[in-house]
Amino acid sequence: MASGSAGGERVAVLRKARGLTQTALARRAGISTSLLSKIEVGDRTLSPEVAAAIAQALRMTLGALYGEAELSEDQSVRLEHLRTAVRRFDIPDQTAVPEEAGLRGELDRAVSLREHAALDELLRMLPGLLTRATTYAHAVVSSTGWAMLADVYSVVYALAARHRWMDLVEIAPARQAWAAAQQPNPLVAVCAGRDRAGTFLNCGDFDGGLTVVDRAIMAAESTLSGPDKAFAAGTLHLRGMTLAGRLNDRHLAQRHIRAAWAAATEFPNDVRLHNQIFGPANTATHVLATEGDLGRPREVVRLADELASGEIRLLPPTRLGPVHINTARARLDLGDRDGAEDSLLDAWAVAPQMARIHPMSLEVLRVLISLHRRSSPRLVKLARQAGINL
């Protein structure tokens, strides 16, 4: 099975490998056989909520269900170098200790690559950056050094989550929290809590992730004040609304949405701290995605139109790409195949490296092709780039 396969296609292969009928798997997952059949043949997209239920029924994580993103040979080598750097978290390099200014510049570059969804370039630089940040933190033993190391681990988590490297998805936030605890920094610790909740999100354990979010919010409210408190709580509520949306808990999602908007009023524009972005534009993108998970495609399209008229120009590609992907999914749910195709092409235009491996991007593409869109040369080209068999 190609690692570039879309989720619905993978479900069919995984089900058959376990000797399960569609009826048996549907019963285990608590969905209808008809829905499962449509997902497998490409008549319906595999939503995150249903994917999590199927993953649980198959006794695997959500990330494992989607499968790791396909890598070139060179990328695979770099990934092993990154895993080595993570493994050597308490073994500093024996070469010269890097200068703080240079290390800060490298970290800023890594964060910029992440925001621009330049994933290949980010993988190329992260092993060396993590090694140097580890060396600096152990040598200098300062709050700044440990905070920078925690921020590097946050970037590692973000890259791992995109590619579904589940070992690093699990361990990077733990290393991030460990670094944050060496010289206590409440804001860095709260950011680590947000990424830990992301581990639960990527594994499909949405209830567990919400517990982590609630605890981190309590910590933020008791240890922080002013803009730092609003920033930390706001980023946590973004994670909370996503998790609640995946659970299809409308009431809880709305509670997190209201709290996030309240915190966003503290910031005229989005701000970045410790590899996290928060403000009105990023809040809007998370609300849009959550409305899609709650089964409200018309609201997704409405919010997308609002963003297009203003705040969308403020978004980095790492947020703009998912906006287009979620809009494509919503338009497809509404039967607007041409609009879905246009939105998917927009996602590939602004963040091609992300769109090539994003589970919902691949799902929308697969379903569009399945629904008699093979005549579209644009979709055929995207399918070849994504490694999807026609």
Image: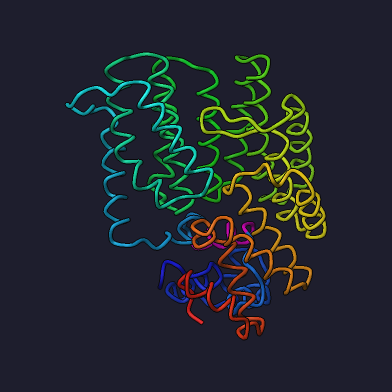
Q: Residue at x 20, y 23 (%)?
A: 96
Left/right placement of residue 293 relative to residue 120 reads right
Q: Residue at point 29% right, 20% down?
A: 138
Taking the image as shown, residue 151 lies to the left or right of residue 87, namely right
Residue 93 among magenta residues: no
Residue 252 appears left or right of 60: right
For residue 310, side relative to residue 378 (left or right): right
Residue bounds of the magenta highlight: 48-58
Does 370 appear above or below 226? below
Q: Main secondary structure of the magenta part?
A: helix
Q: Which residue is drawn at 48% across and 54% down?
A: 61
Q: Which of 187/269 is in front?
A: 269
Please state the horizontal and vertical placement of residue 23, each as a whole percent of the image: 60, 76
Tell me the quadrant of the picture where the N terminus can be found. Answer: bottom left
Residue 302 falls in which quadrant of the image?
Answer: bottom right
Q: Does the magenta stretch include residue 51?
A: yes
Q: Where is residue 251 in the image (x, y as percent from the top left)?
A: 79, 42
Q: Which residue is drawn at 21% across and 29% down?
A: 93
Q: Which residue lies furthest to the left in this view?
A: 94
Of residues 106 and 164, the one drawn nearer to the viewer in this rendering = 106
Q: Position of residue 183 (x, y in %)?
A: 41, 15
Image-quadrant location for residue 329: bottom right
Q: What number of labels is visible?
A: 0
* Coloring basis for residues: rainbow
Q: In this view, does 2 lie above or below 273?
A: below
Residue 79: % across, % down: 32, 50
Residue 76 falls in image quadrant:
bottom left
